[in-house]
Image: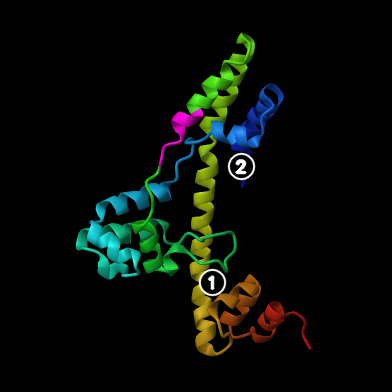
Amino acid sequence: MITDPAYMLPLAELNQFVVAEFDGTMETTTKLLAGAAPSEYRKSALALRDMMSPAEREAAAIGGGIAALEPQSLDAYKNHLRKHGPKVLGFDLSNSAYMDHPARELARIATMPDSRDPGPDAAELAVALRATLEARQVKEFDALLAEARETYPIREEGEAIHSVVMGMVRLFAMEVGDRMVTAGDLTDRVHVVFLTLDEVAAWLDDAFDPSEITRCALWGGCP
């Protein structure tokens, strides 16, 4: 989040101009930025979808999983999961990751609609808005828009990095959760997220019983 101000400040300045000069809203501002921050995940998923044959996509769409894939597509899917699989679908370690449900992820990719580049729409909107301004205002608008579009990809990159880091932490957490389930201290590995790092470390050193604290966290109140 340390990098967020790098795109948030230019975004705020552009939005202030849009509100003041065009009676616009944040929706207008975001439309001006459309296409400036493409998703690497979506790019990877669409490349894989296009590689798959119609038969592969049809089988994957109904839950056929990796059994539906030919060797080339299977290798590409493994590379996709290696890069994007650990990403958590949200901002909490209890949320699942793409790799947790590989057949579901493959079905999502197989049925993913074509992406449409919103960049031309953003450019068209900028032209229309620019036509309503005086010459001196056009220069300011262009400068604000250029800086906002230049920095806005930081948002997508930040989200991508955050989800990967959360995903890697989740891998460690779920490994501990699995061990706790095997030991009989938890009934569901996801419940490990209710423990602190110190409590997890203490359990690994055989110095902590997590059953009571997770029960309290889940159902509220302790006897």
User: Horizontally, is 43 left or right of 220 in the view?
Assistant: left
Q: Seen from this angle, which residue lies furthest left?
A: 71
The answer to whether 211 is drawn above or below residue 63 in the figure is below
Regarding residue 149, the answer to whether it shows in the image is yes
Regarding residue 6, the answer to whether it shows in the image is no
The answer to whether 113 is drawn above or below residue 146 in the figure is below
Residue 80, horizontal then vertical, whole percent = 35, 57
Q: Which residue is mark 1?
A: 173
- The part of the image, by quadrant, that contains residue 90 is bottom right
Give the numbered dot on residue 213.
none
The answer to whether 147 is drawn above or below residue 211 in the figure is above
Whether 18 is among the magenta residues is no
Magenta-drawn segment: 116-122
Q: Amino acid at mark 2?
A: Asp
Task: Name the residue: 64% across, 83% down.
Answer: 210
Q: Amino acid at mark 1?
A: Ala
Whether 120 is among the magenta residues is yes
Circle 1 residues within 10 Å: few <14, some 14–19, many ≥20: many
Label 2 SS: loop
Task: Name the residue: 36% across, 57% down.
Answer: 111
Q: Which residue is mark 2?
A: 4
Task: Name the residue: 53% across, 31% down.
Answer: 149
Residue 122, horizontal then vertical, whole percent = 50, 30
